[in-house]
Amino acid sequence: MRKYYCGFMILVTAIITAILPDIVQAAGGPAEMLVVVADSRRAHGEIARYFVDSYNTNPVWFGIECTIITAIMGVTFGLLTDFIMKRVGIDLTSRKIVEH
Amino acid sequence: MKRNLTLCIASIALVMLMAIPAMSAEVAQGKTVKYDKDNKIIVVEEYDLNITPQTKYGKSTGKELTFDLKEALIGKTPEPGDIVRIAYTVVGKDNKAIRLMNVTKQDIMKK
Amino acid sequence: MDWYMMYMPIAGIEIFWPGLVLIGFAVGCIGGFFGMGGAWMVTPGLNILGFPMAFAIGTDIAHIAGKSMISTFRHSKFGNVDYKLGLIMIVGTVVGIECGAQVVMWLERIGEVGPVVRWVYIGLLALIALMVFYDYYKATQKKKAGDVGEHGAEGITWYKTLHRINIPPVVHFKVAGITCSAWLPIGVSFLTGVLAGFLGIGGGLIRMPALVYLIGCPTHIAVGTDLFEVMISGLYGTFTYGAKGRIEIWAVFVMLAGAAIGAQIGTVATKYAKGYGIRIAFGLAVLACMVSIILKQFKIDMPATVLILGAVGAICIYICMIMFSGAAKELREKKSAA
């Protein structure tokens, strides 16, 4: 039973993930939508240029990149500041109140 | 439960990996000279990056560029005189547009 | 370009970057100190700084995703997250966020996104301010009466009635210790999802009490599960707004850096804060934010910027002062004890 449940969960998740980009794109809809073109001529540096290119050429990929990078940045900054605070002598990992 | 969670995350990651990674595109900005709606072709007088309070979209280079809009995502319909920004790739001798932004008609700064 | 301006390559605008750092720092600081989200000031703040409204919402939601990742990991370590409940709620959250984002995109197309979102925010902030001042009033009344006990959820048992709805599938949540129709958490998460997707907030403001009063979760499980949902809504919101091209990733980076430092200072400061006076300062900051949105709505841009940055800056300085004086005292005591 558990096996079928797992399989069902994977199938549902995969279907939703596969059709989501289409739903997301559909938000653009008909002709009079607002399309933004990022000006890569004014982007300085390789990284900025990469993001602008990815924004202009493949929005779904840009969305995925944003999600991954934001998650990584959040965890990195959090762990880094935790580490610094520990070095200062204040341990916050066991506190009750959590910011969000 | 944790196993389910891992499986869900793995299936999401798998589908996401199937998305095609980014390719590079050129960007041009300028004044619309002609827009052929039926043949999906736009001719633009290119502007440079000389942006000043007087020339906030740049200065004209005098060069005219033609773009094929057949596969492009087009924003508000351009009319002659409108400032447009186009992301495009060069295929052979053609400029194939990917996205067209009508800068004049959708000044997002006002939103 | 002046040194204090930063070019945002996606939105194509120049932004006063110290303002961006201050907003990020303030969200972290206020969020860490009060234990509730500070995202309510980010969307209006970014809009007042010059971001188009849809970009402000997308950037705010992405910044929430980053911030909530670490909080969720911390909470899951203590086993405070009911993953089964969280996973079921994902359905409602994701659909809700998408609906909220679609409404934003539609409003953008018809050119009304700025005013509509601003007015909704004005309403929301008025509600938060009212809540804060009412809370303060109640606390002072109780103090006068000599009653210092905790006010809990005992009086409100709506969830008992809602648990009688047995539309299948009826699910038992082991960690939270409740049994109810799966549609109840899905419905709750859908509504909060719509709000989160529309305003670019985490939705904890509504989801937390809903989990306690409507679903019947114990408070500590509600906090953990809510954080898990905030993370999911943040991540999905980031994806959907990113795919719609309404996220300025550079601004997210700058704000996250500020927020990480701010959150630590805010959380440490809670150890040393005494009395309810700070709540009044918080309420005033909310009111100042509300007034600055009204000013922005009537295109009085400069005073709006000064007011919002001034208000959040002042409350940050206040919290920093509490933290530094308290921490210095504690370290001094530690040294003398050693």
Image: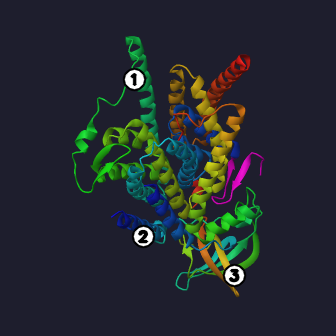
Q: Amino acid at mark 1?
A: Glu
Q: Nearer the viewer, residue C325 or C86?
A: C86
Q: CA distance from mark 3 to mark 1?
A: 69 Å
Task: Please state if C182 lies on the left or on the right of C244 as rendered.
Answer: left
Question: Do residues under tags 2 and 3 come within 8 Å of each other at their CB atoms?
Answer: no
Q: Amino acid at mark 3?
A: Val
Whole-percent x and y of residue C305?
62, 39
Which segment is the magenta one?
C1-16
- In the rendered view of the protein, which quadrant contains the C terminus of chain C? top right
Check disc 1 and report the residue beneath it: C150
Task: Please state if A92 lies on the left or on the right of A27 as rendered.
Answer: right
Q: Nearer the viewer, residue C332 or C278?
A: C332
Whole-percent x and y of residue B96?
63, 81
Q: Quadrant of residue C143?
A: top left
User: Which of the numbered marks, if any, corresponds to residue A15?
Assistant: 2
Residue A42 visible: no
Q: Residue at x 42, y 35 (%)?
A: C127
Q: Residue at x 35, y 46 (%)?
A: C174
Q: CA distance from mark 2 to mark 1?
A: 47 Å
Check disc 3 and report the residue beneath it: B90
**Could you tell me which secondary element the residue under label 2 belongs to?**
helix
**Where C151 falls versus B54 (above or below)?**
above
